[in-house]
Structures are given as C-alpha cells and as structure tokens.
Amino acid sequence: MSDSSIPAYADSRKIFQQEENISGILDLGRLPRFRKTLANDQGSVSLELKFSLSDEKKRLIEGRLQAQVNVFCQRCLKPLAIELADDIKLVLVQDEEAAQRLGADMDPWICEDYKLDLAELVEEQLILCTPIVSYHDSGDCIHQQHYVAGEDATENVTNDNPFSVLRSLKESDSSD
C-alpha cells in the first residue's frame, strides 16, 4: 500500500455508485490540522474506506483507520508514541438540514459539491479519536521531573503564604 493509492479527492457522484474501496498509507503532510497536535512529523496513518449506497439510497462511508504518532506527554512534555484506531461510519450529506434529518445512529459528513476531500475526512476522524490527555504509562516522567505523587505530595508543601510579602507591605504603609 502506498500513498499514491489515496487520491486527494473522490468524485462523490461516482464513487458511491461504483462502490469503490480505497486503502493505503496517508502521509502526515496531508493532514496539517492534525499535525499541529503532534510532537513531531514522525508517524503513519493507514486507512481502509468503503463507499456504498444503502437500501434507502444514503451514501455510506465505512472503514477503519490506524495511526502511529507521537504526541506530548502532559506530565513531562516529551514525545510519547501512541496508537490511534477508529472505525468510520458516516453518511455523506449536502448540507446541515440533511444532516439533522439523519437518525441518531448515523454521523453526517457534509460535502456541498461533488469533490469529497479524503484527507480532510481522515484528519477529522483522527482529531476526534485522539485522547485529550496523554502521558507515559510507567510514570517514569514523574520521577524524572522530581514530582511527588499520592500521599507524599503533602509532605513537600510549605506553609509559606505567597502573599505574606504583600501583607508586610500593607502593614508598613498603615504604620506610616
């Protein structure tokens, strides 16, 4: 599978009628919004998409994507390799009104003209399946940053009030 098998656009007038399948590796360079959430440009995205018409003549996009990417650990802010996977089940619609008419079990993908941007579709699904918070499972980054977790954390807390300097300034002003 190569990136050349993933076209930039699909013609929505034909791809559903012909019940096409598209699979391959998508370069992260084609996903600029998703790339901004990553620690670096290293990684890959593989996908399989199937385009079909339902019995009700709804245009269905079904498939699966998997990605190996590096995000930032929220504890130590160093790169962290994660694997993303998502099942895609969308209905192609022309506008918001058509999207609202869909049942609750169907997710819409709005395409106002015949050019279906496949990279944008994949990018949106990747953003949606990326965890909000990622951190090293082993907790090694806590020890490297000299953090204290759990009950020991209260032992390192000092009772100094950061505003005590302001209190002393206020007291010196009122005594003048």
Image (cartoon, grey):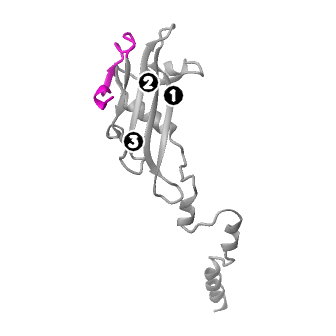
Residue mark closest to the camera, 2 vs 1: 1
Q: What kind of element bears circle 3?
A: helix
Could you tell me which residue is drawn at 35 percent across and 41 percent down? 32
Residue mark closest to the camera, 3 vs 1: 1
Q: Which one is nearer the viewer's eye here, 151 or 127?
A: 151
Going by the image, does 85 lie left or right of 104?
A: left
Q: Which residue is mark 3?
A: 33
Would you call the spot at circle 1 few (<14 residues within 10 Å), some (14-19), or many (20 or more)?
some
Q: Callout 3, which amino acid? A: Arg
Q: Which residue is mark 1?
A: 87
Q: Is residue 13 magenta?
A: yes
Q: Which residues are magenta?
A: 1-20
Where 78 sits versus 8, above or below? below
Q: Which residue is mark 2?
A: 110
Residue 101's x, y, as percent?
55, 17
Going by the image, does 16 lie left or right of 158?
A: left
Residue 3's x, y, as percent?
31, 31
User: How far separated are the C-alphas under marks 3 and 1?
Assistant: 20 Å
Would you call the spot at circle 2 few (<14 residues within 10 Å), some (14-19), or many (20 or more)?
some
